[in-house]
Image: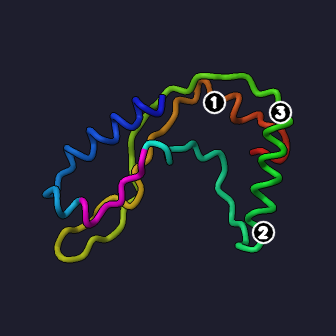
Amino acid sequence: AKGRVASMVDSLRRSFPLEGKVVERAVRWVEAEALHVTIASVEVPADALYDVEDAVHAAVQNTLLKPFTLRTAQLGCFWRSAGSGWGRIPRVVWLGLEEAGLSPLLHLPPGVG
């Protein structure tokens, strides 16, 4: 699955509506190994980061989560001002997921989601 998403990102990168060198200076593209699904976004104080990471890891290890399939949906981005007359450029490009199939992510055990 990551390979297919990485291929989509490469395609988007090649078809981006700015000259290649400008895009490479303005946009930081994430490697396929860093692609992830964000389940929840929370603020964690820097001094508690490792404790939270350990707690989530322990919760996941104790979960009998079976493999499941996710299907991609819309593609979008969060914009930022580019300056220098470029207008706006994407800060983050995201790929949405179809609601059907999200049930395993919506019903994670306490401490995971």
Q: Toward which corner of the image does residue 29 lie, by quadrant? A: bottom left
Predominant SS along the magenta part: loop
Q: Secondary structure at mark 1?
A: loop
Q: CA distance from mark 2 to mark 3?
A: 23 Å
In depth, the one of 44 and 55 nearer the eye is 55
Q: CA distance from mark 1 to mark 3?
A: 17 Å
Residue 10 in percent (x, y) is at 29, 41
Q: Secondary structure at mark 3?
A: loop
Q: Is residue 96 left or right of residue 67?
A: left
Q: Which mark is residue 76?
A: none
Q: Amino acid at mark 2?
A: Ala
Q: Toward which corner of the image does residue 46 lie, by quadrant? A: bottom right
Residue labelled with disc 1:
102
Could you tell me which quadrant the C terminus lies in? top right
Mark before the other along the chain sequence, 2 or 1: 2
Please provide the residue range marked out in magenta: 24-31
Q: Amino acid at mark 1?
A: Leu
Q: Which mark is residue 48?
A: 2
Residue 25 in percent (x, y) is at 25, 66
Q: Which mark is residue 63?
A: 3
Q: CA distance from mark 2 to mark 1?
A: 29 Å
